[in-house]
Image: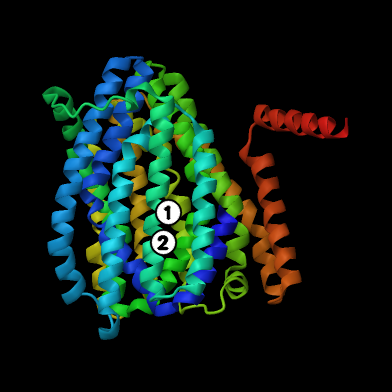
């Protein structure tokens, strides 16, 4: 998926051009802004389904799924109303779009909205698959989705109509196909998905909406940080810079997909452990999954970080201005963000999220006004990512403190066993690439050499500094067993 994603981004950028590629990204961002309503409920749906699966109450699980579908359909109607009024007004009167591309922009908006709606309806089905830990389903369906996007890259080159409009149509078509596959899979394998009752259960809906209401602050702050900044950049800098940021996000998405898949496997275990009152195992999962997810993103990011300029030149025919800075800074932001994900899952499992969302969501909401001020005084557009990194680091420590208030959790142990550990690994991982980078040229041989050096340095740092004796012994046994099996 990572390889195909990077390849298709290159093809799509060259087929659409910098301006249209940036336009698609910013319009997609505008549509996703309406996820403020659905995003908060998505976490609620996932948490309640996983929690009840941990409890083993099949009847309540079926009721939760049916209620979730009812909620999502009502939300779709509200979002369509808002998008077709406020959204269209903002698109046509406030955004920085060339006069000759207004019509195409409106078509893209409509198909992006339809794609978004299809994805909203898929949320309860995805939550059920994750709760049941059927990760193979995600693997196979993701392969189908990847093949679909690869075909899009081909068809857009031979498009008989406006390429930007045709691209948005094809993206919508792929989303509809994937939604149908998820639905068929869930209906076949999970009993709670077979009989949807559009009923009203006051107590359950109140609990879900109460949870979602506080989670709304966190969801809105994350969206405003990502998509709101995208719109600010369009207003102050134009669509070309949106293209640079869009490319950086594509690179980041390709890398962090590994982390997302890892956490998708871990999250149900954390929630179920809480439901079973197995706090010791849950805390162990928080510690280890934080370390392993960080090590994974560090290993994948190092070659990209130290070879960003050459990779972009090799990958793209046209490299928009500021793309290098956006890529490098967004990678750092992802490393910071991955440190709180396991802890967030545990906090959501408790259901006690009022203080978390008010404090952390409030800090994250500062991204938009602070970025506005800095862009207004003429700072470069990548200052928005630097602001996000600083605020993300501040939020991390508030997350620890707020979680400790409601659960038995040692901030001191986490700092020593996790944060101090990964800090040492990070420093050790960048020493040799940092020293050798000035000696390298801008050619393929040096790119390979520096990439190998990054990976070897990173792997050695993780094994000898980041892992304990038991973990090193486990890896050694696994490696030997694979080697001897192949030898036989």
The residue that appears at 44% across and 51% down in the rendered structure is: 336
The residue at which mark 1 appears reads as: 174
For this view, does 462 lie left or right of residue 262?
A: right
The label on residue 66 is: none
For this view, does 79 lie left or right of residue 28?
A: left
Answer whether labels 2 and 1 touch (C-beta < 8 Å): yes
Q: Secondary structure at mark 2?
A: helix
Tell me if residue 484 comes above or below residue 299 in the rendering: above
For this view, does 352 lie left or right of residue 311?
A: left
| Place of residue 154 in the rendered image (x, y in percent of width and height, measured from the top left) | 54, 67
Task: Indicate the quadrant where residue 89 lies.
Answer: bottom left
**Camera sees residue 22:** yes
- How many neighbours does mark 2 have within 10 angstroms: few (below 14), some (14-19), or many (20 or more)? many
Tell me if residue 188 comes above or below residue 390 in the rendering: above
The residue that appears at 41% across and 74% down in the rendered structure is: 163
- Measured Cα–Cα span from mark 2 to mark 1: 6 Å
Q: What sort of colour scheme is used for the picture? A: rainbow
State the residue lying farthest toward the right: 488
Task: Indicate the quadrant where residue 269 lies.
Answer: top left
The label on residue 170 is: 2
Tell me if residue 273 comes above or below residue 317 in the rendering: above
Q: Secondary structure at mark 1?
A: helix
- How many neighbours does mark 1 have within 10 angstroms: few (below 14), some (14-19), or many (20 or more)? many
Q: Quadrant of the C terminus?
A: top right
| Place of residue 420 in the rendered image (x, y in percent of width and height, measured from the top left) | 52, 42
The residue that appears at 30% across and 75% down in the rendered structure is: 104
The residue that appears at 22% across and 65% down in the rendered structure is: 369
């Amino acid at each position: 998926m990572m390889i195909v994603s990077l390849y298709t981004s290159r093809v799509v950028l060259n087929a659409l051009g910098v301006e249209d590629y940036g336009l698609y990204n910013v319009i997609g961002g505008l549509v996703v802004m309406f996820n403020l309503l659905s995003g908060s409920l998505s976490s609620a749906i996932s948490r309640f389904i996983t929690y009840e699966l941990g409890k083993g109450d099949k009847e309540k699980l079926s009721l939760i799924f049916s209620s979730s579908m009812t909620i999502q359909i009502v939300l779709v109607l509200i979002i369509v109303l808002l998008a077709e009024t406020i959204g269209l007004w903002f698109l046509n009167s406030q955004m920085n779009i060339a006069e000759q591309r207004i019509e195409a922009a409106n078509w893209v908006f409509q198909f992006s909205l339809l794609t978004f709606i299809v994805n909203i309806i898929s949320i309860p089905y995805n939550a059920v698959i994750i709760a049941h830990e059927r990760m193979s389903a995600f693997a196979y369906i993701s392969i189908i989705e990847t093949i679909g996007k690869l075909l899009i890259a081909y068809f857009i080159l031979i498009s008989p109509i406006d390429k930007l409009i045709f691209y948005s149509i094809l993206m919508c078509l792929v989303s509809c196909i994937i939604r149908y596959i998820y639905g068929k899979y869930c209906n076949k394998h999970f009993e709670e998905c077979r009989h949807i009752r559009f009923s009203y259960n006051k107590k359950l809906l109140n609990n879900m909406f109460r949870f979602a209401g506080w989670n709304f602050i966190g969801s809105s702050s994350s969206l405003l940080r990502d998509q709101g900044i995208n719109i600010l950049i369009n207003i102050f800098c134009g669509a070309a810079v949106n293209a640079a940021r869009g490319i950086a996000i594509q690179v980041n998405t390709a890398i962090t997909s590994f982390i997302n898949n890892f956490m998708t496997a871990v999250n149900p275990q954390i929630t179920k452990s809480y439901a079973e009152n197995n706090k010791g195992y849950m805390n162990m999962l928080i510690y280890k999954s934080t370390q392993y997810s960080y090590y994974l993103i560090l290993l994948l990011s190092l070659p990209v970080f130290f070879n960003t300029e050459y990779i972009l030149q090799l990958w793209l025919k046209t490299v928009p201005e500021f793309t290098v800075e956006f890529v490098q800074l967004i990678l750092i932001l992802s490393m910071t963000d991955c440190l709180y994900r396991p802890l967030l899952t545990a906090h959501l499992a408790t259901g006690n999220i009022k203080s978390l969302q008010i404090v952390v969501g409030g800090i994250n909401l500062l991204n938009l006004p602070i970025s506005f001020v800095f862009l207004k005084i003429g700072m470069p557009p990548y200052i928005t990512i630097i602001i996000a990194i600083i605020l993300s680091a501040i939020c991390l420590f508030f997350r620890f403190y707020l979680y400790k208030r409601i659960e038995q959790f040692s901030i001191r142990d986490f700092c020593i066993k996790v944060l101090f550990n990964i800090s040492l690994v990070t420093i050790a991982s960048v020493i040799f690439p940092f020293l050798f980078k000035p000696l390298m040229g801008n050619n393929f041989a040096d790119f390979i050499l520096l990439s190998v050096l990054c990976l070897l340095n990173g792997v050695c740092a993780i094994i000898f500094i980041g892992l304990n004796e038991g973990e090193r012994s486990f890896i050694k046994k696994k490696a030997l067993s694979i080697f001897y099996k192949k030898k036989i």
